Image (tube, rainbow, N blue to C red):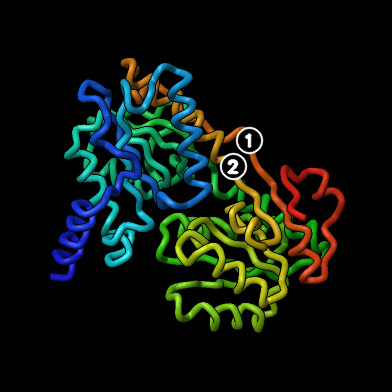
Amino acid sequence: MKWMMCRLLLAVALMSGPCVGYAEAQQKHDARRIGFLSVYSESDLPSQRWHESFRRALRDRGWEVGQNLTIVYRWVRGTPLCKEAGRRACVPVLVDQLLDLDVEVIVVHGGFPARAVQAKNDKIPVVMAEASDAVGRGVVKSLAYPGGNITGLTSITPVLAEKRLALLKEVLPDLSHVAVMWTPEAPASIYGWEQIPSSAEKLGLKLHSLKLERSDDLDKRFEESVGSGAEAIISTSGVSSTFGHKRIVELVAKTELPAIFTDEAVVALGGLMSYNRDTEDLYRRAASFTDKILRGTKPGDLPIEQPTKFNLVVNLKAAKAIGIELPMTILLRADEVIE
C-alpha cells in the first residue's frame, strides 16, 4: 500500500508541475528525443552547470534543444517518490517513465541508475555521463569492448580514494587513523566504503566506519568518530548529496578535524578540501557519445573512457578555523583556492 501511495504521489507531482526541468511542450514534434536520469536534483548548482555544459557541447555538434532535440529529465533528489521510498525503489520507476516516453538514448549520472536502466532495457542506447568503476561493478564487460547497449565514461573509485587519503596524509604527515563517512542510502557510498580499506592499507592507515543512516542520528555518529581517535575524515560519494552539503559541513566543522570530500560544492560551503574527476568535462564528453549514437553508431562499438581532468579544491578559511596550515605543495597543485 505504501508503494502504491508513493507512485500516486509521484503521478500527482508530475501532473501539477514539471519534473523535467525544461518545458517539453515547447519542443518541436520532429525533434530527436533523449532522456537524462541524474542522482542529483534540478536545483543543485553544480548539476545545473554540468547540464549546461552537456547542452552546449551538443549545440557545438548541431543539436539545439527546442529545435531538433528534446531532452527529458528525471531527477532523483527532489522527487517526492525518491524522498518517500528511497533511491533503490524510486529509480526503477523513473527509468520506466523514460522508457514510456520513447526516448532514443538515455544518459545517466551514477552507477546505480546505469544498472537500473540496464535491468529494464537492452535495446535503447545508454550513455554514462559519470559512473564509478563500470567494469568492477559489472555494468560493462571491459573498457575497450563494452558490448551491449551501454557506453560512456567511468571513474575508478579505489584510485580516487587512495589519492584523497594521500592528500590527508600530506596535510598531517603523522596521520594514522581516519574516519570514513558513508551511508547505506547511496549505492555509490556503499561501494566507496568497500573500496577504501585496500587504499588505506597501502598508506598504513587505520579506518573507523562513520556510518550515517538517519538525519536525526548524525550528531551522535560524529561524536563517536571523535571518540574513536580519528585524526581526519574522508567522505565517500553520495554522503553530502543525501544529507545536504551544508549539514555535513556543519557537522564536520564541529569535530575540528581536517576532512576531504568528493564534492567541491561542500568546500565552497566551508569544507576543507575536495578531490574528484572534473564532472563538467565528463558531461562535455558524454555529449560526444550521445551525438555519435544519434548519428547511427552502436553504443557497444564505442570504448568506455575514463576521466582525464581532476580538480583539487581547498578552503583556506576552513583550514584556519581548525588551526592547520595547508602545505605549499597542496596549494600550488590546487585548481581552486577559496580564501
User: Is residue 93 placed above or below 152 in the rendered structure?
Assistant: below
Q: Disc 2 to disc 1, how far (Cα)?
A: 6 Å
Circle 2: element type:
strand
* Rendered residue at 41%/37% (across/down): 128
Q: Earlier in the sequence, mark 2 or mark 1?
A: 2
Q: Are marks 2 and 1 in contact (CB under 8 Å)?
A: yes
Is residue 170 found left or right of 201 in the rendered image? right
* Rendered residue at 61%/33% (across/down): 308
Which residue corresponds to mark 1? 309
Q: Nearer the viewer, residue 311 or 49?
A: 49
Residue 39 point in image, percent of width and height: 40, 51
Residue 272 is marked as none
* Rendered residue at 71%/71% (across/down): 257
Residue 123 point in image, percent of width and height: 22, 30
Question: Image quarter for residue 219?
Answer: bottom right
User: Is residue 289 placed above or below 46 in the rendered structure?
Assistant: above
Q: Nearer the viewer, residue 74 or 12?
A: 12
Residue farthest along the front direction in this orientation = 26
User: How many badges with numbers are in the image?
Assistant: 2
**For the C terminus, which image quadrant?**
bottom right
Residue 277 is marked as 2
Q: Amino acid at mark 1?
A: Lys
Residue 134 point in image, percent of width and height: 44, 41
* Rendered residue at 20%/25% (across/down): 29
Residue 242 point in image, percent of width and height: 45, 63
Question: Image quarter for residue 103?
Answer: top left
Circle 1: element type:
loop
